[in-house]
Image (cartoon, rainbow, N blue to C red):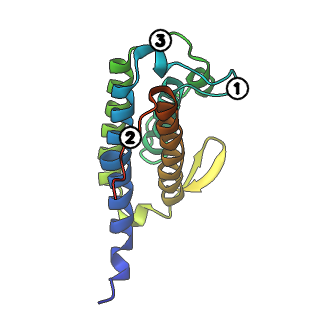
Amino acid sequence: MAGNPAEIPRLFLAEARFHLIQQYLPWLRACLEKLSEEDIWWRPNEKSNSAGNLVLHLCGNVRQWIIHGVSGAPDARNRPAEFSERRPIPKAALLAQLEATLAEVDVTLQQVAAEDLPQPRAIQGFDQTVLSAIFHVVEHFSYHTGQIIYLTKMRTGEDMKFWNV
C-alpha cells in the first residue's frame, strides 16, 4: 500500500524528533555516563575535540539552527567558545544542558507546520529553508554523536552495544 505524499512533512518532522530525542540523546547520555569526568575533556591531540567540547558544540548548533533559525528566538551563540572550553564542566551539567536544549528543540519541532518547511531563513550566514535547517541539524548531530561514541570507545575500550544484531 502506497503512502500518502501529503503525510511527508509530518513524517519528516517525526523522524527528526525521533533521531534527536529518542536515538542520539540516549546514546550521548550513555557515553557521558561511561566516561570519567577527566575523560569527557580528553583530546587525542590539540587539533581534535573532546566529548565535552562536542556536546557544547551540539547545543550551540541546535540552538542556532532550530531554536533561533526555525522558531525565531534570539541568536546568542558563541561558536568559538564551544571549542575553546578547557575547564572541566561536570558531566551532570553538560548532560543537563544537552537535555534542556533538546527539550526546547522538541517543543519547537512539534510546532512546525507543513507550510513552514519551505519558508526561507538566514542562519549562520546561509540561506536555508526551515526543512533544510532541520535536516542539517539531524545530520550534524549524527556526525558528532558518532565522534563522541568513538571517543568513548577509545577511552573505555568498551563496545557501546547500541546495535546488537
Disc 3, SS: loop
Distance from the alpha carbon under mark 1 to that under mark 2: 25 Å
Quarter of the image where the N terminus is located: bottom left
Q: In this figure, which residue is indicated by the disc labeled 3?
A: 88
Q: In this figure, which residue is indicated by the disc labeled 2?
A: 160
First in sequence, mark 1 or 2: give its number: 1
Disc 2, SS: loop
Q: In this figure, which residue is indicated by the disc labeled 1?
A: 47
Task: Compare residues 107 and 54 and report the one nearer the observer.
Answer: 54
Is 83 drawn above or below residue 13 in the view shown?
A: above
Q: Is residue 127 left or right of residue 91?
A: right
Is 144 drawn above or below residue 109 in the view shown?
A: above
Q: Is residue 82 left or right of residue 30?
A: right
Distance from the alpha carbon under mark 1 to that under mark 3: 18 Å
User: Residue 7 placed where, x, y %?
Assistant: 33, 75
The structure residue drawn at horizontal position 32% and vertical position 60%, both measured from the top left corner, is 14
